[in-house]
Structure formats: C-alpha cells, structure tokens
Amino acid sequence: MSAQKGKDLLVKIDDGTGNFVTIGGLRTRRLAFNADTVDATDSDSVGRWRELLAGAGVRRASLAGAGVFKDAASDALMQSVFFNGLIRNWQIVIPGFGVVAGPFQISSLDWRGEHASEVTFDLALESAGALTFSPL
C-alpha cells in the first residue's frame, strides 16, 4: 500500500435509517485492533515455554478521533447516540486498504473550546460485536 492522505480515512455512522453519514471535521483519527491471549501452558509444555490457544482470545477494536463538527445535524446525531447509550453500525474507510464495518458504542465524547478558536470534540468508540472487513 502506498502512502495515503490521513484526511481520506473516513468515519461514518448509521443515522438510524441504514444511511451512513460521515462524521465531519475529523482532523485526527486512530483505529486499533487488539486481541487477548489465552495461556494454555501446562506441565507438558516443551521447555516450559508459554503456549497460547489459537483463536480463543477476545478481539476488539477501538477508534479515537478529534475535530470539529461540520454541521448541527452531525453534532445532534452524535449527542443523541451517546446520551441514549445506543450501539450503532459504523464504517471506517481506510484509503487504499478497505472498509471495517460493524457495531460500535461511543465510550467517550468530549467538547473543548479555546478562547480564540473553534469548539472541538474528541470521540472514542469501542467495538460492540463482530466486525467485517471488505477490501477496496
């Protein structure tokens, strides 16, 4: 994969009708995948080296972003989803790679404002079910 523009990594949320809306104004974003390991080491493990049980750990994804809302509608959608504790389907479009899609819950939503600047927000999502990957 050749170098891609960071601004082309898109974060989209299902607006409740099956239509995906791009969360606008994200200036930074990070998507991380993690998997817990299950230690299967026992007294017969060769040389007492740790053994892991393949495919047994919990997998999860987290997404973090920061930016400005592009309009009142996207701001209202994020507030509604957060304050109602909803789990929605999201799409993360990774340029030149693919689309990660599935249910996420907003785990953190912060607003910040500086005296001589615009109001910004920080957003954190945690996966809430099985995710899919579709190559571009």
Image (tube, grey):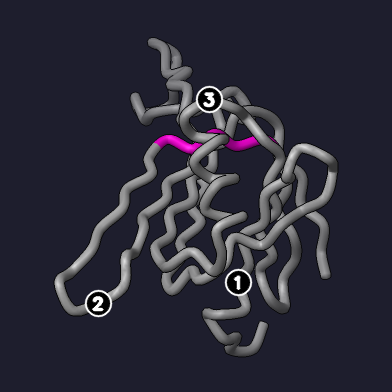
Circle on res. 117? 2
Q: Which residue is mark 3?
A: 84
Q: Amino acid at mark 2?
A: Ser
Left or right of residue 113, residue 133 in this image: right
Asked if the residue under mark 1 is in contact with the one under mark 3, i.e. CB atoms within 8 Å, the reply is no
**Vertical arrangement, residue 69 with respect to residue 38, above or below:** below
Residue 9, disc: 1
Q: Nearer the viewer, mark 3 or mark 1?
A: 3
Residue located at (64% from left, 89% from top): 2
Q: What element does badge 2 sit on?
A: loop
Amino acid type, callout 1:
Leu
Relative to the observer, which residue lies in front, 116 or 16? 116
Q: Position of residue 132 (x, y in %)?
A: 76, 44
On the image, the x and y values in percent for residue 36 come to 46, 30
On the rendered structure, is 2 left or right of 45?
A: right
Q: Residue furthest top?
A: 43
User: Of 40 and 29, which appears nearest the observer?
Assistant: 29
Residues in magenta? Answer: 103-107
Q: CA distance from mark 1 to mark 2?
A: 24 Å
Q: Count the marks: how many? A: 3
Quadrant placement of the N terminus? bottom right
Q: Main secondary structure of the magenta part?
A: strand
- Between 47 and 133, the one lying in front of the other is 133
- Residue for point 25% across, 58% down: 112
Mark 3 belongs to which amino acid?
Answer: Asn
Left or right: where does residue 111 sit relative to residue 18? left
